[in-house]
Amino acid sequence: MAGAGMTQEWFTAAEMAALMNVSHQRLNQIVEERNWRARDTMRSASNPNGTWKREGGKNVYHLSLLPAPIRAKLAAQAQAPAEPDADRKAVKERLARDLAWSQYEKASDTAKERAKKKLAAIQAVEQLLLTGMSKDAAVRLIGAEQGFSAASYYGWEQRIAGVARDDRLAYLMDRYVGRMADSEACTPAAWDFLLADYLRPEAKARPFEVCYRTLAGVAKTKGWTIPSCRTLWRRVEREIPVVVRVLRREGVDALKRMFPAQERDRSIFHAMEAINMDGHVFDVFVRWPDGSIGRPCFLGIQDLYSNLIVGWRVDRSENKELVRLAIGDMVQRWGIPDCVYLDNGRSFASKWISGGSANRYRFKIKEEEPLGLLTELDVKITFVTPYHGQAKPIERAWRDFCATIATDPRFAGAYTGNSPENKPDNYGQTAVPLDEFLKVVAWGVHEYNNRPKRETAVCGGRMSFQQAFDASYALAPIRKATPQQYRLWLLAAEGVTARKVDGSVHIEGNRYWAEFLSQHRGDKLVVRFDPQDLHADVHLYSLSGAYLGAAQCVEAAGFADVEAGRAHARARNAWIKAAKDMAKAEQRMSVEEVAAMMPELPEGEAAPVPVPASIIRPVFGNTALAMQPEPDLIPDQTPSTLINLNRFLKLVGDE
């Protein structure tokens, strides 16, 4: 070994085995497998870069053949100050001592116990020798008590000859070499074939034994030499790192799971400073009001500081309207958060939710696109990796909901199971009505929020999520929304016509009315409303965007409901009276006063004489003569007139 400041370049086979912490037999296998003694790698005058040579009748190997960690360790030792006993023999002894303790540390508990029993036997014999007993007698006596032969004892003594007393235990441990079947030859092409078949994504469900049988069939036709299946598997375990096997067979996601997850401290936030939201489809069949059956989507919003569920809604699927309404519930009850963590799904990346955000990496971003709800509320948006529980802690709550809500006894017969393989025996027997489902979900969310002794950094095993949230919320600076901002997340129905008779607005079979609507009869209006609460007030805007006011839902009363009729009559009479009062207040001049002020015909002007008609309209149809006066009253009667009169009187007399 070189002195301080110099790194030894050439090592014998024994030194290489000690440095690599392998047996001499295993080193010979490595030399053969890696072809260290190839003719073209021998150091000579014509090949100054060779990696092995003959020296003193032995094969010695260059430093470059050692693994990189061992070379680094040797380089560090070379920089250390020189030791007084830094000769070749001392270095060998130190390497052997390190190897012995390294092997002892890696051994099983059973092997360690055997070594301890041997050390105890040697110490017992040495105690008897101090009493003057001969060595053979002491060995036979202790051997009879502990069950070992004299030959075994003397073999143990040979192992620890010249070894320091504090190192005896490591040297007394048995070092079994084990089966050396790996020495069986394996054609390099066969090894490459096996790795190509085993280390591929499709082989995730393909056992190694199947790959070996495929190799054996090809080896017969190619004339390859292969060892047993177990031997090749040991070589795979020894030479192919686990990370490589997982990456090639299971993919990058499986490899990521092998890396320790980052533990992020969420106690740096305060209540409602940061939230995350996500959707979850419940494994429960629900009957919707229209009679259809399906699995509902639950959209939840979670406070990152306390894990409290601060808002949720349920719908048939995850959509932008559901996201808007859930955000509205949260803001109206708790306030406006500073930042939100979302995945890049279509519902969350919709322009109506995150429009105007600089990092909205879905859809085409246009300069003229409208600001989304979160952008208008000045909430910082961070898009995270989908299906990544470490990025969105709310995904961990879904496992809790699957155990507490989806399998609730009130859902018996409606639970679908979390996979086709886990369908219950009563699959599809019933479907839960939507109202009943919402009640159970509300109970489950309340239980989740108020469950005591939560083991989180914030709760400390003492508080519930609700208690931790309340303690921080009382001291935190929370932004509150204005009444005008409350209407931002309501859904808008454009072009709704106010009825011409009374100005009422009809949406989804419900009728809404307010006094100001009388001014907009027949007009097209914009209505903002909550589709899941159609009995709440709706807000009306003109088509130009001007806010008009809120209208209440007018419910239909029962046909025989007398009290409802009286209440309606009182309300109508009050409205009519108010209208009359307004009309009276607006009428400052009577009709008589208006008539008195009407202009008259100026004096001296006569009424205009009608101009005689120049065209006489002909008479069509019945031309019978009208009744004539008596003959003595009519002068100059003609005979024809009398004849006609007599005929008329005769007809009247006949009737």
Image (cartoon, grey):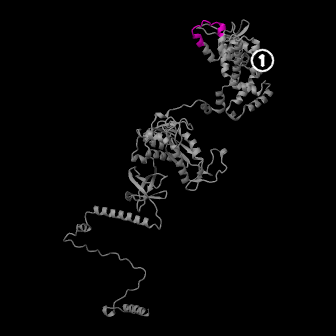
Mark 1 Cα-neighbour bin, 10 Å: few <14, some 14–19, many ≥20 = few
Residue type pointed to by label 1: Ser
Q: Position of residue 610 (x, y in %)?
A: 28, 74
Q: What percent of the width, then of the height, locates residue 391?
A: 53, 35
Element type where label 1 sits in the image: loop
> Dividing the image into 4 quarters, which one contains the N terminus?
top right
Residue 614 or residue 311, whichever sits in front: 311
- Is residue 179 on the magenta stretch? no
**The C terminus lies in quadrant:** bottom left
Which residues fall within the magenta stretch? 75-91
Quarter assignment of residue 246: top right
Q: Is residue 71 visible?
A: yes
Image position of 77 (left or right of 503):
right
Q: Is residue 417 left or right of residue 642?
A: right
Q: Is residue 214 above or below residue 184?
A: below
From the viewer's perspective, tell me whether residue 243 is left or right of residue 354. right
From the viewer's side, name the closer residue of 310 and 71: 310
Q: Position of residue 571 (x, y in %)?
A: 38, 63
Q: Nearer the viewer, residue 337 or 84?
A: 84
Residue under the point 21% across and 71% down:
605
How many labels, in total?
Answer: 1
Using the image as rendered, state which of residue 384 and residue 593 is in the foreground.
384
Relative to 11, say whether 408 is above or below: below
Position of residue 648 measured from the top left corner of the image (x, y, whole percent): 40, 90
Which residue is the extreme one toward the front?
131
Whether 89 is among the magenta residues is yes
Residue drawn 57% across the image and 10% down it: 80
Judge whether residue 38 can be spotted in this image. Answer: no
Q: Which residue is mark 1?
A: 149
Q: Is residue 146 above or below residue 275?
A: above
